[in-house]
Amino acid sequence: MYRISSFFFLLLVIPGISARAQSTMSLSDCISYAVQNHPSVQTAMLQTKDAEWQLKENTAIGLPQFSAGASYQHFFQAPALPAEALGFSAPPGTKIAFQLTNSISGNLQYSQLLFSNSYLLAIKASRYYREYVQIQLVAAKATVRNQVVDAYLPSLLISDNLSILDKNLANLEQLLSETKAINKAGFAEQLDVDRLELSLATLRSERDNLIRQQEVVVDALKFAMGYPVTESLQLSDNLEQLLSQYADVDLTTQVNYSNRPEYTQLLKGRELSQIQVDLYKKPYLPVLSGFIQAQGSYQGNDKLFWIPSAVAGLNLSLPIWDGGATKARKERAMISAQNIDIQRGMLENAINLEVEGARKSYLNALARVSNQEKNLDLATRIYETTQKKYKAGVGSSFELVSSEQQVYSAQQALMQAQYDLLTARIAVKKALGML
């Protein structure tokens, strides 16, 4: 019975394991996985939860506070003085105690913060900090998304290169087979066969190198995603699909800095600095709190007596002079805010530079694609003409191999140009904060 159960268990579990081990993802799938599973994003999510609880913790300071307590005391030697020392007439050796032997007491206290400028600003700062870490989470997701895109694209370049290489290998293998048949018939030299075999061996060696490079690049993609490096990952996109997906490029719209999470994060940091300035601008404001306390106790020696009491009151704290510490804190807070203003200007300038550079790179990449398409058409026509001449017996194998290599080089150049165009389009979207 145990063996049968184990067998059916394996039938159910192994397909799930295989499906996980052979995951196939597009670029959007990789991004979705990364923004949920990458450690930096998970850390930012925890920080947002921590900010929520920090706000609740700070808010609780101004809410009603209740406390209760109880105590028991037994004086096995109570403090006492001789009766004559206190002016009482009593037999010699008589002492008068100042504390009863037993005391049992309990108390219930209610307190409430009525006014505190520091408390109000602390609540405001906690809300701003919560917004700050939420922006930080958005920035973390954007950083991870950009890292995944940057790691995904090189793997596509290698994949498409392998596809082109496989087509060229198939064509060259067919040509080699035909040349061997012609050689046996006595219409081609052995040198022609040797040249084609050498070219074929070179392409196969290059293909093996590309496969190893692809494994390294895909592992880097897994790391950028937070995906287990030991598990298999297949990519479903290609350059043409992504070129179509990211076809629209904004070359004219004015830069909106708020689309960049690091910019909004900097602005929120400026607001937090301003709260510190506001706090130290009014150091003279008092802190007012109220309280109500009820207490009862049983006291006595052999017999206990109930002694109740209750009290209500206000506590007022008014700062007068702290040696200039508050003024120093205010000046430091103002300097911190001014530093953020300087950083803001630098960031705006850097974003403008990034956008302009990305747009110019896109125009250059677009022109290179057009030129490489023309070069590939020309190399293909040359190869087709050379192949016809070779099969007709009026061309050499050297010319055929050279023209075939030119076609392959043109294909690689076009693919590299398309890759540069894709990265340029994505760079424009990144710079504008629209990816």
Image (cartoon, rainbow, N blue to C red):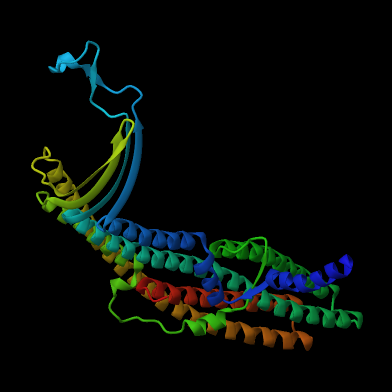
Q: Residue 211, can we see it?
A: yes
Q: x and y percent of residue 425 in the render?
A: 44, 77
Residue 19's quadrant in the figure?
A: bottom right
Quarter in which the N terminus is drawn? bottom right
Residue visible at 19% across and 53% down?
Answer: 118
Give residue 12's quadrant in the image.
bottom right
Is residue 360 toward the left or the right of residue 190 in the image? left
In this view of the protein, can residue 342 be seen by the observer? no
Quarter of the picture containing the C terminus is bottom left
Viewer-nearest residue: 275 or 246: 275
User: Residue at 36% across / 60% down in the picture?
Assistant: 51
Q: Position of residue 238 (x, y in %)?
A: 59, 79
Above or below for 8 versus 56: below
Residue appearing at x 34%, y 69% in the figure: 260
How many numbered discs, if any?
A: 0
Q: Position of 169 compared to 254: left or right?
A: right
> Which residue lies at the image location 28% right of the left edge and 63% below the top edge?
128
- Is 186 placed above or below 60 here? below
Q: Is residue 294 above or below residue 44?
A: above
- Asked if residue 425 lies left or right of residue 391, the reply is left
Q: Position of residue 298 (x, y in %)?
A: 30, 39
Instruction: Where is residue 225? Give x, y as percent.
Output: 55, 65
Furthest-top residue in this view: 92
Front residue of this view, candidates 172 and 397: 172
In the shown orientation, is residue 371 left or right of residue 430? right
